[in-house]
Image (cartoon, helix red, strand yellow):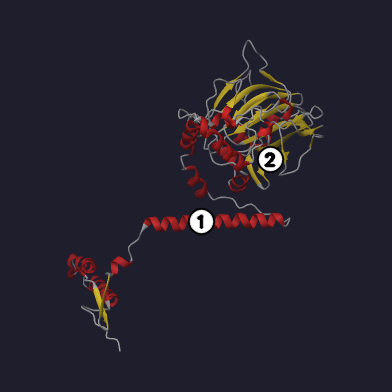
């Protein structure tokens, strides 16, 4: 038979509750008699509680005081909640993939304002600048093949298309990311009026309706927020649009035309340069400093107006059917967007603040038309995968030669009349 003894009392909790009731009673019935002594004694009680001990036969076991049992440890709690949230997100993605495999439509679940604000609080611009510095570090000759081979294996890069297949040729990661292709690797389609400006995956395409553009199916962003106020090369900016439709009408310059869009996502393993999608003239550049959130298809389904939050470079001009624009959208570790004919462009620079934009006109007194671009001509490059958005004016009989989600390569047809 076991004997149980306590040095003071094993009923710690009832004693504490009894003292609380006593203090509350004094406070309620006679406030004048209540002073800080009772409260101080109550607060000091847990500190003065000795360790409890109980005996089982001849063995004496000591236990910690009650306050030690309720001590919070922030790191384990943070790891547990973070791991639980990450596990839940992975489960949601797995369920969406299973529904897509069965041919069922998955309704998008948009992030809340607090989730977007939390994501934007991450210093992605600083991290991207650090990543850019790291990419410029020259690798030792013996380390280049292992590092590049790991990247090739991870993202499925086809080095047989590269102009230089020898991995030792690329001195750093930046040169490897911006590798050129063999001339015959991407033949340009001459039969269609608009071609793909880059390798990538088609996220969405179609006609712009109600001044809203779909980044993926069911998730939209504002056309005016994305492009900014309409400007003209020779005249002052247009007055603010009174409604969404009037802003759309400012872009459509010819009667009977409609506004179309196409979104192409460049994965890290894709060819990182982009080219002119048609014959057109670039007259204006607008740079939006912003966040550098991930733009992969999963994030595009989760964050509304993702492209409006991120840093981007908008090139606008005209083609044979009217208005034409190409926008290069930055992403995490892709703060560097380069336009070959624009030496004044400096993206992800600390001198620019979020929420603003800066304009530059290519129309001058010496060049009153702008920068002419031929279909397939080199236009710019990313340092890693990102997104290209085309928004252009065309007649109503313009047809896309695409399917949502399909892989496409630079030079292949996007659509034609």
Q: Name the secondary structure under disc 2.
A: strand
Q: Which mark is residue 263?
A: none
Q: Which mark is residue 201?
A: 2
Residue toward you, 359 or 71? 71
Q: Position of residue 386 (x, y in %)?
A: 60, 36
Crowd rating for badge 2 (residues with CA inside 10 Å; few <14, some 14–19, many 20+): many
* The N terminus - image quarter: bottom left
Residue at point 82%, 34% (across, down): 397
Q: Does residue 4 appear to the left or right of 150 in the view shown?
A: left
Q: Is residue 279 left or right of residue 288?
A: right
Seen in the picture, residue 25 relative to 380 is either above or below; the reply is below
Q: Which of the two labelled residues, at mark 1 and mark 2, occupies the earlier sequence position?
A: 1
Residue in front for this viewpoint, 288 or 163: 163
Q: From mark 1 to mark 2, how far is it between C-alphas?
A: 28 Å
Helix, strand or loop at mark 1: helix
Residue 256 visible somewhere in the drawing: yes
Q: Is label 1 in contact with label 2 (beta carbons under 8 Å)?
A: no
Q: In which quadrant of the rendered view does residue 161 lie?
A: top right
Give coordinates of residue 303: x percent, y percent.
58, 46
Q: Which residue is mark 1?
A: 85
Residue 288 at least partly seen: no
Q: Position of residue 157 (x, y in %)?
A: 64, 38
The quarter of the image holding the C terminus is top right
* Residue 282, picture quadrant: top right
Residue at the extreme top: 366
- Residue depicted at 49% across the width and 49% down the height: 114
């Amino acid at each position: 038979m076991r004997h149980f003894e306590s040095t003071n009392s094993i009923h710690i909790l009832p004693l504490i509750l009894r003292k609380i009731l006593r203090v509350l009673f004094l406070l309620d019935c006679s406030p004048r008699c209540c002073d800080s002594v009772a409260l101080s004694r109550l607060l000091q009680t847990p500190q003065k509680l000795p360790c409890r001990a109980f005996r089982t036969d001849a063995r004496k076991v000591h236990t910690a005081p009650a306050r030690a049992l309720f001590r919070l440890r922030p790191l384990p709690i943070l790891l547990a909640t973070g791991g639980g949230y990450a596990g839940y997100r992975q489960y949601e993605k797995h369920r969406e993939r299973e529904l897509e495999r069965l041919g069922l439509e998955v309704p998008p679940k948009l992030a809340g304002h607090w989730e977007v604000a939390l994501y934007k609080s991450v210093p992605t611009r600083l991290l991207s600048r650090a990543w850019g510095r790291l990419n410029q570090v020259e690798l030792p000759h013996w380390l280049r093949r292992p590092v590049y081979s790991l990247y090739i294996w991870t993202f499925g890069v086809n080095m047989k298309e590269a102009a230089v297949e020898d991995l030792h040729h690329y001195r750093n990661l930046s040169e490897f990311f911006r590798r050129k292709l063999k001339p015959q690797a991407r033949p340009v389609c001459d039969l269609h009026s608009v071609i793909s400006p880059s390798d990538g995956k088609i996220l969405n395409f179609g006609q712009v309706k109600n001044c809203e553009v779909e980044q993926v199916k069911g998730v939209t962003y504002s056309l005016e927020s994305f492009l900014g106020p309409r400007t003209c090369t020779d005249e002052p900016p247009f007055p603010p649009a009174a409604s969404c439709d009037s802003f759309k009408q400012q872009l459509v310059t010819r009667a009977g035309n409609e506004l179309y869009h196409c979104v192409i996502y460049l994965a890290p393993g894709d060819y990182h340069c982009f080219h002119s999608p048609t014959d057109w003239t670039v007259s204006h550049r607008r740079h939006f400093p912003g966040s550098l959130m991930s733009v992969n298809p999963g994030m595009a389904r989760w964050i509304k107006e993702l492209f409006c939050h991120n840093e981007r470079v908008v090139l606008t001009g005209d083609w044979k059917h009217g208005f034409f624009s190409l926008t290069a959208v930055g992403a995490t570790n892709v703060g560097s967007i380069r336009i070959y004919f624009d030496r004044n462009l400096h993206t992800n620079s600390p001198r620019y603040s979020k929420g603003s934009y800066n304009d530059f006109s290519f129309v001058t007194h010496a060049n009153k038309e702008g920068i002419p671009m031929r279909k397939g001509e080199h236009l710019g490059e990313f340092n890693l995968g990102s997104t290209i958005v085309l928004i252009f004016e065309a007649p109503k009989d313009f047809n896309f030669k695409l399917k949502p989600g399909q892989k496409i390569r630079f030079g292949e047809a996007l659509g034609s009349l």
